[in-house]
Amino acid sequence: MRELAWLPRAAGVLAVAAAPHNAAAIEPIVRTGTPKFKFSLAAYSYRDLLNAKPPKLTLEDFLGDSQEGLESTELTSYYFPKTSLPSFSARSSKRVSPGVDISGTAVGNDFAIRRARTRQSRCAT
């Protein structure tokens, strides 16, 4: 009887394959103009320099490098200095030229921790 154990599965696959394929979908999105892809430099690419002890590069240095022929930068929050955000913002705004976009940021997401108290503390920060 074990030889026929595959038979119910095969019948199910055949039933799905034989069913009509009338899946609903939306019409394609109409776009105006041409697509624009901006090349960006991610701070994660500099992780060895930013994490070195002592650091071989600061985040402000990274911001300067990201403007060398690129149109955007991707910041990574865990490389932000431990100083207050306003002081970092004031220092870094001097390094970023107008027209350089922030294309995104990567953040840590340890939200699936089993211990409720630890998980809540991670989500609050």
Image (cartoon, rainbow, N blue to C red):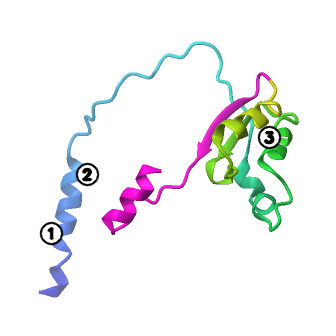
Whether residue 1 is visible here, answered yes or no, is yes
Count neighbours of disc 3 (C-alpha within 10 A) and say few if under 14, some if 14 to 19, many if 20 or more.
Answer: many
Q: Name the residue under label 2.
A: 17
First reached walking from the N terminus: tag 1 or tag 3: 1
- Amino acid type, label 2: Ala
Give the residue furthest to the left: 1
Give the residue furthest to the top: 32
CA separation, marks 2 and 3? Answer: 53 Å
CA separation, marks 2 and 1? Answer: 14 Å
Q: Quadrant of residue 112?
A: bottom left
Count neighbours of disc 1 (C-alpha within 10 A) and say few if under 14, some if 14 to 19, many if 20 or more.
Answer: few
Q: Which residue is drawn at 42% across and 50% down?
A: 124
Residue 115 position, x and y percent, is 33, 69
Residue 49 position, x and y percent, is 81, 60
Q: Which residue is drawn at 78% across and 36% down?
A: 91
Q: Which residue is drawn at 84% across and 45% down?
A: 61
**Magenta residues, start to end:** 98-125
Residue 40 position, x and y percent, is 73, 39
Helix, strand or loop for disc 3: helix
Which label is found at residue 8? 1
Asked whether 33 or 11 is in front, the reply is 33
Residue 79 position, x and y percent, is 68, 53
Whether residue 112 is visible here, answered yes or no, is no
Helix, strand or loop for disc 1: helix
Helix, strand or loop for disc 2: helix
CA separation, marks 1 and 3? Answer: 60 Å
- Tell me if residue 11 comes above or below residue 34 in the rendering: below
- Tell me if residue 69 comes above or below residue 108 in the rendering: above
User: Which quarter of the rendering shows the N terminus?
Assistant: bottom left
Q: Mark 3 points at which residue?
A: 63
Is residue 119 a member of the stretch shown in magenta?
yes
Q: Quadrant of residue 19?
A: top left
